[in-house]
Amino acid sequence: MLSRACMVGIYQRKLEEIAARGVELLTLVPPYWRDGSGATRLERLHTRGYRLETTAIRANGHFHLHHFPELGAALRDFRPDVLHVDEEPYNLAAWQALWLGRRAGCRTLFFCWQNILRRYPPPFSLGERYVLRGADHAIAGTRGAADVLRARGYRGPLSVIPQFGVDPQRFRPAGERPSRPFTIGYFGRFVPEKGLHSLLEALAQLDRDCHLLAVGDGPLRPHLETMVIQLNLHGRVRLEAAQPSSAMPAQYGRIDALVLPSLTRRNWKEQFGRVLVEAMASGVPVVGSDSGAIPDVIGDAGLVFPEGDAAALAGQLRRLQREDGLRRHLAQRGRERATRNFTHAGVAEATVAVYRELKGYPASS
């Protein structure tokens, strides 16, 4: 498996689950990845039963142009039956991996989150066409992403499986709620498309006993600090730096509701919203906008509001603050939904079934 995402420690639990199902697994990750929020570095948290190794990366931070110069040598040494590429098909890394995998005699599959039908100029359109025509299988993170893949011309076998699940033993209800102000949580990037300005505007419409804990990093932080002053939210908002993934389970014990207020852009809409399933597994009620995959992830286990509508968001949060029964009901429904649909074990089981199909084994063997 070639995966930048598996640098994140809590995501590696899926890899242990895959290995536990009889797969000899080598996972290659870069030592770090740069993006607009800073550098994400490799965490080694779940490493039992498989090999987790770093590989060199070129054009680090360039989403479309990064690639892995040592991948060919790794394939010749490991000689895998299946090469699982956690890259979108229009990225150079996906083209490179597919070409090298086919030269090495591997069956190849790629993963896709893209849920907007976009047209790319050459050479990206040509590389995408090569991947869509040459891959042996595709995995889409959501039904929306699967529909886009088909619309872009992919005709091969296709499975809908989230990229990662959640560990219900690590993310679990914290117990009795301590005495504190009603605390709303936002965990993620501080970037415009995540809709944080709507969340601050909603907070300003709630009583002063409602507070916000926002944990993350990104270029929007100075603007958020200015908004806190402009909206007279001093003392009600805490902006804290991003935490390593191993520290995140404890963060959910600090909040009474989690909000994901994402906004659809011309070239992006929410592709999944991993914090939603982490919160649900932790027994924290969730509120999300109707951007992209959010309503499908939440299902009937949380509250949804029209994206960008601060008044509607404030109304949903006011309900959660005032209605203890609703809060308890959604906490229970969320935990049930997360453990039924979004665990690492379930994701691993479905993924290994794809590997076995590619290798020609019966799915139950």
Image: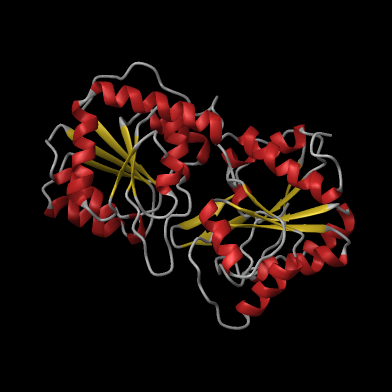
Q: Is residue 80 above or below residue 49?
A: below
Frontmost residue, 293 versus 6: 293
Frontmost residue, 255 versus 153: 153
Q: How many marks?
A: 0
Check the picture and name the quadrant holding the C terminus: top right
| In this picture, residue 111 sits left or right of residue 260 | right
Q: Residue at x 53, y 61 (%)?
A: 114
Q: What percent of the width, then of the height, locates residue 295? A: 40, 46
Q: Is residue 327 above or below residue 6?
A: above
| Residue 129, image quadrant | bottom right
Q: Is residue 111 above or below residue 280?
A: below
Frontmost residue, 75 versus 325: 325
| Residue 291, image quadrant | bottom left
Q: What percent of the width, then of the height, locates residue 200? A: 21, 49
Q: What percent of the width, then of the height, locates residue 361? A: 86, 42
Q: Residue at x 25, y 48 (%)?
A: 199
Q: Residue at x 88, y 59 (%)?
A: 76
Which residue is at the far bottom? Answer: 122
Figure colour scheme? secondary structure
Which residue is at the far top? Answer: 176
Q: Is residue 334 above or below residue 219?
A: above
| Residue 235, image quadrant | top left
Res. 33 visible in picture: no
Q: What percent of the width, then of the height, locates residue 78? A: 87, 52
| In this picture, residue 350 sits left or right of residue 213 | right
Res. 300 visible in picture: yes
